[in-house]
């Protein structure tokens, strides 16, 4: 069985408070894009999970990977046999694109289908939340307003043709930013804008209304992030922002030709890039 785990971008990201459980309250719009990791899962004759990875190197031990954690979580609730998993890693890590969370959520969905577990949708979301704050979004994998610690989801209205013809260019300037490092530079404050109304606004006006609360400190501490954002704006992006806690950035372009030129210039810098429709 083959599954595709997509990345996401944050459209706006506000850190609105510190929670008693140690997490922070956030407000953002998560938007899936078609930059994907690929999972191939097979039944194995031996118990447990065998995880084979290729593509981008993945740091840490195999048991830290959310694919392995997803398998172990399912075996805590259901009697399933062993599996052999191949992961083609395309989405950069430590980039704010949610690749690890998406891999874990994809694994949950694939195990549910492969073993015909018939896990109710609400329970699948609960299992995903145990894996990580972003994982429930990737179970749904459609644009959503996100709040709480990132696990409270509400469908964004009228997303299908909100801004037709726009393209997103994602640039990863080759830097890994830890979540802990990112939060150290942020002071929580109330959200200055209602993100649920954002899609009714022209994209060119977004810059005066929204932003990413992690971006200012990161641009100061990580010059390549600042350079990548400047490149996108210089090439005509109607809106540009760092996604998540970084270090990937993206720009929204009204013309595909402009988007492809911005991608070309990012590639010329030696950065990893991706272009897709918004």
Image: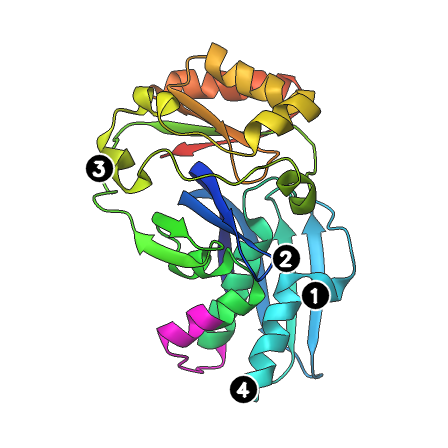
- The answer to whether 136 is drawn above or below residue 262 in the figure is below
Magenta-drawn stretch contains 253: no
Total residue callouts: 4
**How many angstroms separate mark 4 from mark 1 (CA)?**
20 Å
Q: Position of residue 169 (x, y in %)?
A: 47, 27
Question: Mark 4: which secondary structure?
Answer: loop
CB within 8 Å, label 1 to label 2: yes
Question: Mark 2: which secondary structure?
Answer: strand
Residue 51, numbered circle: 1
* Rendering colour mode: rainbow
Query: Closer to the N terminus: mark 4 or mark 3?
Result: 4
The residue that disc 4 covers is 78
Residue 161, numbered circle: 3
Residue 218, numbered circle: none
**How many angstroms separate mark 1 from mark 2 (CA)?**
7 Å
Which of labels 4 and 1 is toward the front? 4
Looking at the rendering, which quadrant does residue 219 occupy?
A: top right
Q: Position of residue 105 (x, y in %)?
A: 51, 62
Looking at the rendering, which quadrant does residue 162 occupy?
A: top left
Query: Closer to the N terminus: mark 4 or mark 2?
Result: 4
């Amino acid at each position: 069985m083959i599954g595709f785990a997509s990345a996401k971008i944050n459209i706006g990201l506000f850190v609105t408070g510190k929670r008693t459980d140690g997490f922070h309250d956030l407000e953002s719009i998560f938007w899936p894009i078609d930059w994907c990791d690929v999972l191939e899962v097979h039944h194995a004759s031996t118990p447990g999970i065998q995880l084979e990875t290729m593509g981008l190197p993945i740091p840490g031990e195999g048991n830290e990977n959310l694919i392995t954690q997803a398998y172990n979580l399912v075996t805590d609730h259901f009697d399933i046999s062993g599996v052999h998993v191949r992961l083609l890693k395309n989405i950069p890590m430590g980039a704010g694109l949610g690749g690890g969370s998406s891999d874990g959520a994809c694994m949950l969905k694939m195990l549910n289908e492969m073993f015909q577990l018939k896990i109710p949708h609400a329970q699948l979301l609960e299992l995903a939340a145990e894996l990580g704050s972003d994982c429930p979004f990737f179970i749904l994998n459609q644009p959503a307003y996100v709040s709480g610690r990132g696990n409270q989801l509400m469908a964004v209205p009228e997303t299908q043709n909100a801004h037709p013809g726009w393209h997103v260019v994602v640039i990863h300037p080759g830097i890994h930013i830890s979540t802990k490092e990112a939060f150290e530079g942020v002071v929580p404050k109330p959200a200055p804008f209602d993100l649920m109304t954002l899609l009714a606004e022209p994209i060119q006006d977004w810059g005066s209304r929204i932003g990413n609360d992690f971006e200012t400190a990161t641009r100061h501490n990580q010059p390549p992030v600042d350079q990548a954002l400047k490149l996108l704006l210089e090439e005509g992006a109607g809106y540009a922002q760092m996604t998540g806690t970084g270090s990937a950035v993206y720009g929204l372009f009204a013309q595909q030709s402009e988007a492809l030129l911005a991608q070309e210039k990012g590639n010329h810098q030696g950065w990893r890039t991706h272009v897709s429709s918004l």
